Image (tube, rainbow, N blue to C red):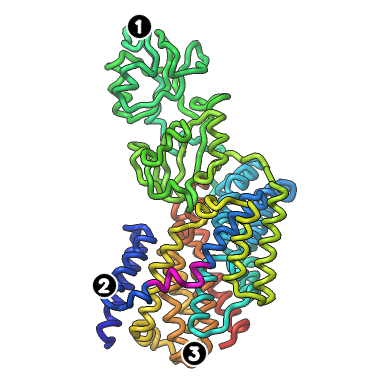
């Protein structure tokens, strides 16, 4: 039986896993609750509690966020993405291959969420021009970003994290390209799988109306003004309808033509008002204001939009300031001056009280905006416009600086001149001093949710080791398999990590499994390196759910996916990678 401290740590681990899986709280808040619990229970002293924030991995990941932002803001990522049009040909297989290779290459050297954010609108436009459904290319985009991420030491935060823990335990650090042989093998196999198993990719209607996708038909109504209406002679801005009812004027039609200034146009008999609001409110308004439902009304994207007004879908990326806020608290309407029709979250559409919904990364918003507002939306770092592409703008002088900083980081790390932390910090500071981005943009580029997650959850791994909880869990759950040899145990650890990663944060899964992997190695008297590689790769490649990895969440709504789409396409790939890892890891990293 474990002692009381080990029991307490195991209880904290189980509680943390339950919270991560159920998503009752944000991952960073869960991590901070875990940290506080460990301190209150006396399982860590105050100095050890700061282990996560003072860890080399945390500082390195901060620097990598800034380095990736510098490459993006200089226009280098967008420039590469725009070159794909001429290479992608006209066929779907070739488009998928080109997108996968490009995003895998970029993701090997920068934070993959930043690369995917740039590629989403471009991939959608490339697919649209070839009359291919976006759902056929966005899953390959997300999956390939994970293929590339496991090819280098800086490809994902998990790689950096596991390397840092290994160094803290006295192991030799992983080299910059040490993961490359296995990573490249998985990349080649992964892309081949996506091409050969294309029939598994969902095919949503490429011309599907946004009105249909967001189920807005019951929330939009064309109401015609009758001769007895109290609205006649007043403008929309001054009308009682606007002041008393929670509805928005989308379009003002007179003599079959949309007026140029709908809110300020005086209302006449037979004018048609296209209104957005709650269905019951729209029905009640007909009698209250003597309005008549326009018999020929058919709701579609063209009905809502015009030459001056566009229907725009925007995605909230992971580092957006909108995450955790409502449209009201963010003053979204004041900042952008557009109408928000609905919010879509993991395939579920929310249409009522949208201004009061706490927003998450991965949410998409359906907006109506004029051309000027669309331009502001395209320039915003808090939103990604998925159905419009920004103008190509490469800051040549800054691009040279950004590229030199990036090459300096890679060279200094590969040649072992300085540790990766120092190299990453040089690159990050160089991006700011070279004016590739401002210090404010550098702060904004950092995904603080990831940083606080690491700061709060890394001490849990330390507590598992110190209390003996990791050893007890190894002896209890893995002891029946120890006699079967390290290869079988490695296969089990990879599988457990892969399953946990699908349901919770990949970094949290790695932190929980690394102490167990090292304990297994010590018990079996073999090298821990193969087990750490297995945990790293399993935690960095999550394909079977849209919540296991941030890039999957990002493409969920823009692709019009369902949860089962990821399960159908991703589960066989997870199993293929499992087999590939079990076959190649012992050859590349002998026990």
Residue 458: percent from left, percent from top: 41, 72
Determine crowd level at label 2: few under 14, some 14-19, many 20+ residues with C-alpha closer than 10 A: few
Q: Is residue 112 depicted above or below 75 in this figure?
A: below
Give the quarter of the figure containing the N terminus: bottom left
Residue 545: percent from left, percent from top: 45, 59
In magenta segment, residue 2 = no
Residue 16: percent from left, percent from top: 33, 68
Is there a contact, CB below 8 Å, between mark 2 and mark 3?
Answer: no
Helix, strand or loop at label 1? It is loop
Gap between marks 1 and 3 measured at Cα: 87 Å
Residue picked out by circle 3: 485
Determine crowd level at label 1: few under 14, some 14-19, many 20+ residues with C-alpha closer than 10 A: few
Mark nearer the viewer, 2 or 3: 2
Residue at the (53%, 65%) spot, across then down = 61
Q: Earlier in the sequence, mark 1 or mark 2?
A: 2
Is there a contact, CB below 8 Å, between mark 1 and mark 2?
Answer: no
Gap between marks 1 and 2 measured at Cα: 72 Å
Gap between marks 2 and 3 measured at Cα: 40 Å
Which residue is farthest right? 86
- Label annotation for residue 40: 2
Residue picked out by circle 1: 227
Q: Between residues 83 and 140, which one lies in front from this camera angle?
A: 83
Determine crowd level at label 3: few under 14, some 14-19, many 20+ residues with C-alpha closer than 10 A: few
Q: Is residue 22 left or right of residue 85?
A: left
Q: Earlier in the sequence, mark 2 or mark 3?
A: 2
Q: Is residue 96 left or right of residue 211?
A: right
Which residue is farthest top? 227
Residue at the (40%, 76%) spot, across then down = 461
Residue at the (42%, 68%) spot, across then down = 508
């Amino acid at each position: 039986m474990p002692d009381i401290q080990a029991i307490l740590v195991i209880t904290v681990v189980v509680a943390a896993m339950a919270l991560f899986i159920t998503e009752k709280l944000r991952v960073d808040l869960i991590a901070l609750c875990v940290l506080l619990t460990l301190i209150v229970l006396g399982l860590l002293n105050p100095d050890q509690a700061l282990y996560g924030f003072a860890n080399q991995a945390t500082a390195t990941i901060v620097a990598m966020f800034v380095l990736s932002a510098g490459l993006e803001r200089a226009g280098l990522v967008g420039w590469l993405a725009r070159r794909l049009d001429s290479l992608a040909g006209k066929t779907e297989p070739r488009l998928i291959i080109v997108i996968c290779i490009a995003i895998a290459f970029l993701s090997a050297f920068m934070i993959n969420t930043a690369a995917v954010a740039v590629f989403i609108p471009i991939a959608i436009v490339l697919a649209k021009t070839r009359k291919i459904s976006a759902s056929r290319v966005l899953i390959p985009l997300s999956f390939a970003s994970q293929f590339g991420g496991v090819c280098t030491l800086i490809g994902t935060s998990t790689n950096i994290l596991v390397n840092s823990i290994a160094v803290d335990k006295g192991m030799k650090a992983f080299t910059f390209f040490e993961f490359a042989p296995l990573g490249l093998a998985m990349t080649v196999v992964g892309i081949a799988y996506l091409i050969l198993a294309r029939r598994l990719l969902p095919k949503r209607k490429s011309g599907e109306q946004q009105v249909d996708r967001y189920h807005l038909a019951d929330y939009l109504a064309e109401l015609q003004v009758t001769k007895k209406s109290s609205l006649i002679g007043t403008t929309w801005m001054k009308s009682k309808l606007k002041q008393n009812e929670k509805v928005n004027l989308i379009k003002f039609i007179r003599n079959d033509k949309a007026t140029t200034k709908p809110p300020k146009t005086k209302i006449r008999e037979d004018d048609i008002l296209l209104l957005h609001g709650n269905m019951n409110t729209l029905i009640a308004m007909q009698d209250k204001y003597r309005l008549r439902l326009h018999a020929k009304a058919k709701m579609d994207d063209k009905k809502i939009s015009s030459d001056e007004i566009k229907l725009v879908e925007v995605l909230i990326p992971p580092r957006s300031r909108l995450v955790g806020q409502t449209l009201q608290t963010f003053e979204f309407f004041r900042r952008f001056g557009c109408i928000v029709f609905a919010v879509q979250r993991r395939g579920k559409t929310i249409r009522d009280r949208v201004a009061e919904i706490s927003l998450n990364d991965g949410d998409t918003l359906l907006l109506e905006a004029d051309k000027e507002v669309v331009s502001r939306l395209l320039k915003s770092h808090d939103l990604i416009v998925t159905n419009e592409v920004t103008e190509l703008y490469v800051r040549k002088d800054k691009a040279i600086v950004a590229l030199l900083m990036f090459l300096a980081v890679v060279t200094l790390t590969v040649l072992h001149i300085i540790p990766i932390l120092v190299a990453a910090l040089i690159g990050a500071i160089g991006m700011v001093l070279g004016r590739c981005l401002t210090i404010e943009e550098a702060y904004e580029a950092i995904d603080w949710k990831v940083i606080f997650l690491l700061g709060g959850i890394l001490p849990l791994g330390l507590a598992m080791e110190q209390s003996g909880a990791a050893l007890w869990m190894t002896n209890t759950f893995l002891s029946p398999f120890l006699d079967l040899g390290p290869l079988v145990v490695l296969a089990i650890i990879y599988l457990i990590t892969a399953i946990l990663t699908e349901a919770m944060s990949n970094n949290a899964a790695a932190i929980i499994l690394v102490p167990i992997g090292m304990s297994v190695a010590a018990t079996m008297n073999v090298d821990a390196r193969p087990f750490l590689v297995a945990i790293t790769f399993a935690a960095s490649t999550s394909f079977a759910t849209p919540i296991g990895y941030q890039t999957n969440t990002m493409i969920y709504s823009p692709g019009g996916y369902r949860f089962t789409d990821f399960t159908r396409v991703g589960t066989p790939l997870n199993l293929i990678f499992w087999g590939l890892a079990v076959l190649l890891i012992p050859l590349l990293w002998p026990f």
